[in-house]
């Protein structure tokens, strides 16, 4: 028995029961939750393919029966730690205070929304405060602030249900406060203005040698600080004094302020001297009385620098909790790439499904409560982990399924010639497996997909909710009995439909004319295809956005 055989069988059976046929590509991502390593993929993939083939040979009844035997194998480790883990250092704190600090370089996507949602969930758990702080210091030429991002972020917070205390705080409004504390660091002889070239300074830091700028007394340093506001980009920086023999060369005399000639979306060219992330947060975390900071492992050195500054001022340190990166299998998350593609016009906007932005997930039919639960299940992961996007889809499916009526969608339709068929003008079909209500479908010509025709040609199949036929160029009805046969979608009275897939590709086909009765924003399930949200109707064409299977 293979290492993951039980889990593979369990997921293959569940996949087959839910969708009528197991798909090997859907099984692999699930195994990461059971400890599958990337280097094991080549070894385990042939086993998945073989088990899927076996499962697909079983009847529907056999699949359901076997799934009961294997259901314990797909109880993910969620039993071990349901809900959010307790935070450290809460015993003597009356009111916990958190902050969500997005950098407005683009819309939030599923990955960076995770940290903000976690801060909100903990504020909610402990009845604490959450500040929304736009971390809009100048950024870099490679990663500039995007003006429309402010509203995109605000809208995403609102839709996700992330509520915060008071008004939005903008760091770009707080420059004078940061300047004030820069002066105090210089007064305490803990910071200095440096005019050294980057290459020269990098060499000195690597060797643990102080540069000449460091030795000037505070009177001269304050004068040089004042002059810095009249200088151009690259001519000077304000640096903090640390141990030049610190084990990590990157920690030695880090930059606290730099000069930028670029225009800021909110303040224009009013300011040219901008603080680094660790400088601005060292001050704001103290002034906002933040008690707990939840941030990624990629900001460990910034956290150490914050602590260093707090120690200079003898301020009490908040608790800092670092979390690992979450790689979402099946979703390509890159805000910088999305920004480039949106700007070039390759993407239709920040709600293009390829951005994986919160706006795009909303437009596809993903519910905010599903995202919240998805992030809650991940929790405070200390190490980098991989989580399949199917986990989010599974949660969302449970939410939307009860209200999503069933329809058919056919790609590359082929008209059937069926002999010996009943002389029916219409047929009643269920709108949902769990609802008694049915709807009438007018019958005329019957269309199926070219793929189904090629796959089942010469075999007996069941036209879903209709009757059985021997499928050929000239087909013949065999019976109306609901027998255990391959089921095929069909469309009769039809309308043109297009479905936008997550990869940005439009699939065009036909669907039932009844979709004309749907309201914009309605989520439906196209049977044996997946859930989709009606986005637009124009020129007798109905445009849907695909959510998931």
Image (cartoon, rainbow, N blue to C red):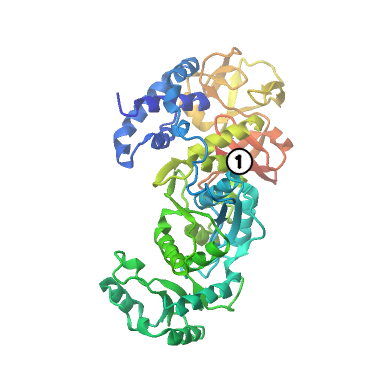
The reply to whether residue 505 is visible in this rendering is yes
How far across and how far down the image is residue 448, in percent?
Answer: 57, 29
The reply to whether residue 148 is visible in this rendering is no
Front in this rendered view, residue 75 or 399: 75
Front in this rendered view, residue 51 or 460: 51
How far across and how far down the image is residue 389, in percent?
Answer: 48, 41
Q: Residue at x 60, y 58 (%)?
A: 132
User: Image check: 510 left or right of 48?
Assistant: right
Query: Helix or strand or loop: what does disc 1 sit on?
Result: helix
Q: Residue at x 65, y 27 (%)?
A: 445
Q: Residue at x 74, y 36 (%)?
A: 517
User: Image check: 211 left or right of 390?
Assistant: left
Residue placed under numbered mark 1 in the picture: 369
Q: Is residue 68 above or below residue 98?
A: above
Q: How many marks?
A: 1
Front in this rendered view, residue 267 or 303: 303
How far across and how far down the image is residue 388, in percent?
Answer: 45, 40
């Amino acid at each position: 028995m293979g290492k993951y055989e039980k889990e593979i069988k369990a997921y293959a059976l569940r996949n087959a029961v839910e969708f009528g046929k197991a798909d090997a590509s859907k099984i692999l991502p699930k195994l990461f939750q059971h400890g599958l390593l990337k280097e094991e993929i080549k070894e385990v993939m042939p086993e998945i393919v073989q088990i899927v083939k076996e499962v697909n040979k079983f009847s529907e009844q056999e699949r359901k029966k076997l799934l009961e035997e294997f259901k314990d194998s797909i109880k993910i480790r969620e039993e071990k730690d349901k809900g959010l883990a307790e935070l450290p250092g809460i015993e003597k704190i009356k009111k916990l205070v958190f902050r969500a600090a997005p950098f407005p370089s683009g819309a939030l996507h599923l990955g960076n929304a995770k940290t903000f949602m976690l801060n909100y969930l903990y504020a909610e758990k402990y009845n604490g405060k959450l500040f929304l702080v736009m971390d809009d210091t100048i950024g870099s030429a490679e990663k500039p602030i995007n003006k429309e991002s402010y509203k995109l972020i605000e809208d995403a917070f609102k839709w996700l249900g992330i509520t915060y205390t008071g008004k939005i705080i903008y760091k770009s409004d707080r420059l004078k406060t940061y300047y004030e504390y820069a002066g105090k660091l210089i007064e305490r002889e803990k910071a200095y203005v440096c005019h050294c070239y980057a290459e020269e300074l990098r060499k000195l830091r690597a060797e643990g040698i102080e540069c000449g700028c460091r030795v000037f007394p505070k009177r001269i340093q304050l004068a040089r600080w004042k002059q810095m506001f009249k200088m151009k980009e690259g001519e000077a920086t304000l640096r903090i004094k640390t141990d030049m023999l610190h084990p990590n060369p990157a920690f030695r005399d880090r930059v606290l302020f730099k000069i930028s000639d670029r225009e800021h979306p909110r303040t224009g060219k009013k300011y040219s001297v901008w603080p680094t992330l660790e400088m601005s947060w060292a001050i704001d975390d103290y002034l906002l009385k933040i008690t707990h900071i939840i941030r990624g492992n990629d900001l460990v050195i910034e956290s150490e620098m914050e602590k260093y500054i707090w120690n200079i001022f003898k301020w009490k340190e908040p608790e800092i909790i670092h979390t690992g990166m979450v790689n979402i299998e099946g979703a390509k998350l890159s805000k910088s790439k999305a920004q480039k593609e949106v700007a070039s016009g390759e993407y239709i906007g920040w709600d293009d499904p390829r951005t994986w932005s919160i706006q795009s997930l909303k437009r596809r039919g993903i519910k905010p409560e599903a995202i919240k639960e998805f992030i809650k299940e991940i929790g405070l992961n200390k190490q980098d982990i991989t989580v399949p996007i199917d986990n989010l889809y599974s949660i969302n499916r449970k939410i939307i399924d009860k209200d999503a009526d069933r329809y058919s969608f056919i790609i590359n339709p082929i008209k059937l010639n069926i002999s010996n068929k009943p002389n029916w003008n219409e047929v009643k079909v269920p709108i949902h497996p769990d609802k008694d209500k049915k709807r009438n479908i007018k019958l005329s010509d019957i269309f199926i997909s070219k793929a189904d025709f090629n796959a089942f040609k010469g075999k007996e199949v069941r036209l879903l909710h209709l009757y059985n036929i021997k499928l050929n160029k000239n087909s013949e009805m065999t019976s109306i009995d609901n027998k255990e046969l391959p089921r095929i979608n069909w469309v009769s009275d039809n309308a043109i439909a297009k479905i936008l897939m997550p990869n940005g590709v439009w699939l065009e086909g036909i669907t039932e004319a009844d979709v004309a009765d749907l309201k914009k924003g309605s989520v439906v399930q196209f049977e044996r295809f997946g859930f989709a949200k009606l986005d637009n109707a124009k020129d007798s064409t109905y445009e849907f956005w695909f959510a998931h299977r």
